[in-house]
Every structure is written in C-alpha cells, then in structure tokens.
Amino acid sequence: MNYTKLINFNGTPCVEFSAGGYTGLLAYEIGSNLIRLRDNVKGMEIVRFSDSNAAKDIMASAEVWGLPTLYLPNRFADGVLRTSDNVYHLPVNEKAPFSNHIHGFIHKRKHELVEHVSDETSATVRTRYVYDENDDFFQYLPVKFVAEYTFRLSERGMEYNVKFTNLSDKMMPMSLATHTTINAPFVDGGKCGDIRITVPIGKKWELNDRCLPTGRILDLKEWDLEYKEGTKCPVLQDISNDMYYAESTELDGEKFYGIIAEDTASGKKVCYEVSENYKFWIIWNDRGFNGYFCPEPMTAMIDAPNLDMPREKTGYTELAPGETYEASQRFFTKG
C-alpha cells in the first residue's frame, strides 16, 4: 500500500514515503535531502545512507549523503560572483590552496514541509525554502527567492522537480547541481568491484590546481572513454572532479539523457535521468574507498559567471524579477 508518514529518524524530522516498490526518506530540515531511496523489490539501496545517521552527522558533511541539491554549486574563484547587474563577494569556505567559495548554502537550511500525500498510484512530498534577509547568507547575496521541491514515488521510480523563483528586484544568478551520492555497492550483497557506470560525455574541460576551468577543452582519452563505453568502475580508484559536457545515450532503444550504473554480477541497474538543462557532469568519488560515488549533474560549469565565455558554452543563466527556473530528475531501476 502506498503511504506517506512523518517520522523522527534519529532526531531528524523526516517524511517516509513509499509507492511503486520504492521507499524514500526525506529530511526536509536538512535542505530537502532525500537521505534514503530503496527499491524494496529488487533489494537495492540506491543513495548513500546510514541507519545510524543523526542530523548532526549529515549536517557535518551534507554534500556526501543522499541527494543534496546545491544552489550556486561547486567553486567560485576567491568567492567572487559576477552578475549582469552586480558583483557579489561570497565567503571563501574552501581553504588554501583552493581559496574558493564552494557549494552554496541552501542544502544546509531548514526547509518547510508543504504537504505529503499518497493515492493508489503514487506518494508525493513537497517542500520549499524562502530565502530572504532572515538567512545569514543574505549579507553576501541579497537576492530574495523561493525554492520549491517535489519528490514523487511511483512505478516510474523517484521523480524529482525543483523550481526557483526570483522574488527580488535584481537579476538572480542561476546555477544548480545535485551532489548525487550513489551507494557502492547498491545491490544487497553486491561487491564494489562489480559496478560499472555509463556516462554519455562530450568534451572534457581542463581544471587547474584550484579545480577551476582553464578555458581549455580536451579531447577524450582512454580514461574518459571508459565512461562512454560503460566500462568505468566508479570506485576502488580515485576519481577527482572529472568535468564533461553532457550528451545522451540509448536505453532500451530510446534516447536517454543521464547515467546508468550496473551491478554486472546481477545485471541490476540504477538509471539516473536528468532534464537537458543539466549540461555538465562532474564525476567524483571521495578517493574511491568510502562506499559511494558521485555523478553530479550541473546546469552550469564551475565558476561559470566569472568566465569570459558565452553563456551557451558555460550554461550559466540569470532570472529577471519574477522569473522561474525548473529542473527535473528521475531515478529508476532495471534488472
């Protein structure tokens, strides 16, 4: 039976919701983070999850649990963010030698639970966050907005939509990413060495020692082609911020814009589909031996608003007062 219910998970207010054979756990007071996604039928623990995690544990490293949504993701050189009508100075929260602002703030805020409902076909949770002068970060970025999140479980898997609306009289910088943490292994009883991922990538962007784009676009080498060919093991080796243009592939004869992770021993797959405004993939795995890996979809590249490049190339955009920006994702399993 499909359901939603409020629970206290190790001191963290959450909504547990279930439909279509999937169960999710949404920590709305930790940035609307989906801290658990499980396929109960196939025995698959999809995102990185610990049943002993308390709120303080997740908050201490909110980017590496579950499905955290990042606004102003990745790095801004020296904390500078240039828009068409302003220059903002964000706090430098990444230590030297990097000396950047990294990952924004919204994924660590207490969000509002709007509703949780279920019916005969699905279970849905909606949350939101209103950003204004009550947020400590407003001193750095005085641009009011509201972020609205919808998570829906059904036989189609987990569908996720996020919508940002500019409530200010200024231009709002818009760059989104999800610091997606996929469990390794993600099949009950599986082995890390059996995982392979397919990432349909285009050209690779060169990054410097501060993990900032140099402006050079690189041809793909053997290391990179393993992503396209589906032969890359995303763990048990160090993968550190490989950044690529996103392309599409095929899944069951249909166009598929996303990544596929397969447990080769069982044939079970995690399929992670994203909307086409996610123009880049970053692949990272926290040195490769910590039980997860991160295929991170980004709407704009690292340091995008500060680069001397056209927006069609960087993916960066801005919202005029009253404008809205939406992006969507879907997880589902096969095998």
Image (cartoon, rainbow, N blue to C red):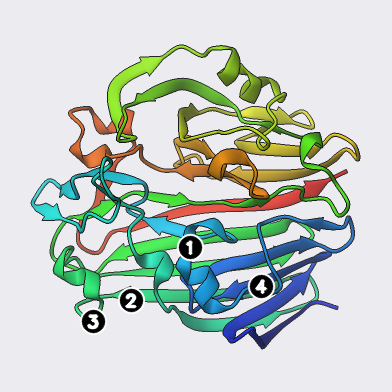
Which label lies toward us, 2 or 3?
Answer: 3
Circle 4 packing at 10 Å, graded few (<14), some (14-19), many (20+), is many
Picture quadrant of residue 265: top right
Mark 1–mark 3 distance (CA, rounded to whole Å): 23 Å
Give me the residue at 54% from left, 12% from top. 221
Mark 1 — residue? 61
Q: Which of marks 2 and 4 is nearer the N terminus?
A: 4
Q: Which of marks 1 and 3 is nearer the N terminus?
A: 1
Picture quadrant of residue 321: bottom left
State whether residue 32 appears in this view: no
The correct choice, above or below, for 56 with respect to 13 in the image is: above
Give me the residue at 46% from left, 11% from top. 219
Left or right relative to 267: residue 23: left
Three-letter code for the amino acid on which mark 4 is drawn: Leu
Mark 4–mark 3 distance (CA, rounded to whole Å): 28 Å
Which label lies toward us, 2 or 4?
Answer: 4
Residue 134's disc number: 3
Three-letter code for the amino acid on which mark 3 is drawn: Asn
Element under disc 3: loop
Element under disc 1: loop
Give me the residue at 71% from left, 44% from top. 271
CB-based contact (under 8 Å), mark 1 and mark 2: no
User: Which quarter of the rendered picture does the N terminus lie within?
Assistant: bottom right
Q: Which of marks 1 and 4 is nearer the N terminus?
A: 4
Q: Which of marks 4 and 3 is nearer the N terminus?
A: 4
Mark 1–mark 2 distance (CA, rounded to whole Å): 23 Å
CB-based contact (under 8 Å), mark 1 and mark 4: no
Left or right relative to 312: residue 223: right
Three-letter code for the amino acid on which mark 1 is drawn: Ser
